[in-house]
Image: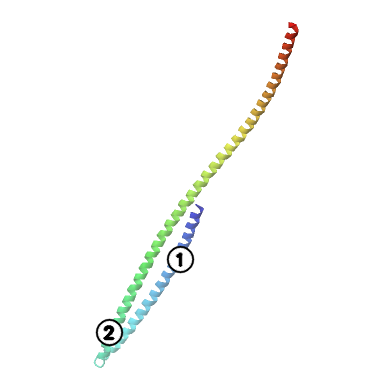
Amino acid sequence: MESSKLRAEQRVRELTDKTEQMIADYEKTKTDLMASNAQKDQMIADLEGEINKLSSNVKEKDASIDEKMYAFETEKRRLNQQNEDLKDQVETLQEDKKSLSTEVSKLNGDLQEIKFDLNRKAEGSKSLEAQLTKKDSKIEALSEQLAKVKAEVQKLKNDMQTKDETIERLNNNVSLLKNQLGK
């Protein structure tokens, strides 16, 4: 029982450490995502500025504009994909956090059950110890009574032996008197 309790407490500590690490990872990922979004917004703003500049010289730089638009769209798709990937990671981390929280709650419940069982067994053990002490006292009292009875029996045996000897002596005296009277 103690071993189970220690393993449960160790598991709770491990899960708590793991949860704290996952929260830290979640916070770091969130910060990275926010920085990435800011960087993306800045890049989009920069690219839009370039597009505005190129638009003023449309006749001279059609080829350059097409090229820049292609690069912009490619980068935009890449950043959107990266943004979606980061959202998926955040969702996964949130699900992991929820799962770990549920597991920690379950383990806390298991720990409470183990503590309850341990307390109940301790109370049962105290009750048994009290009964054992009571029985030991009864045994001791009965042992004392037995010793008294044995002493009385021994005294009665001694008295009986003395009386048997007296009877034997009296029988011998009676026989002797009969023999003397019979002569």
Going 45% across and 66% down the picture, which residue do you hit? 20
**Circle 2 — which element?**
helix
Between disc 2 and disc 1, whose residue precedes? 1
Image position, residue 161 (x, y; %) = 69, 22
**In this rendering, would 74 be left or right of 94?**
left
Image quadrant in which you'd find residue 172: top right
| Viewer-proximal residue among 38 and 172 | 172
Q: In this view, does 182 lie above or below 120?
A: above
Q: Which amino acid does label 2 sit on?
A: Tyr
Q: Mark 2 points at which residue?
A: 70
Image position, residue 5 (x, y; %) = 49, 54
Going 73% across and 9% down the picture, which residue do you hit? 179
**In this rendering, would 141 be left or right of 5?**
right
Q: Is residue 128 above or below residue 153?
A: below
Residue extending furthest toward the bottom: 60
The disc label shown at residue 138, or none: none
The disc label shown at residue 20, or none: 1
Q: Dot 2, how many residues are within 10 Å of its Cα: few (below 14), some (14-19), or many (20+)?
A: few
Image position, residue 2 (x, y; %) = 51, 53
Going 46% across and 60% down the picture, which residue do you hit? 11
Query: Which quarter shows the C terminus?
Result: top right
Image quadrant in which you'd find residue 107: bottom left
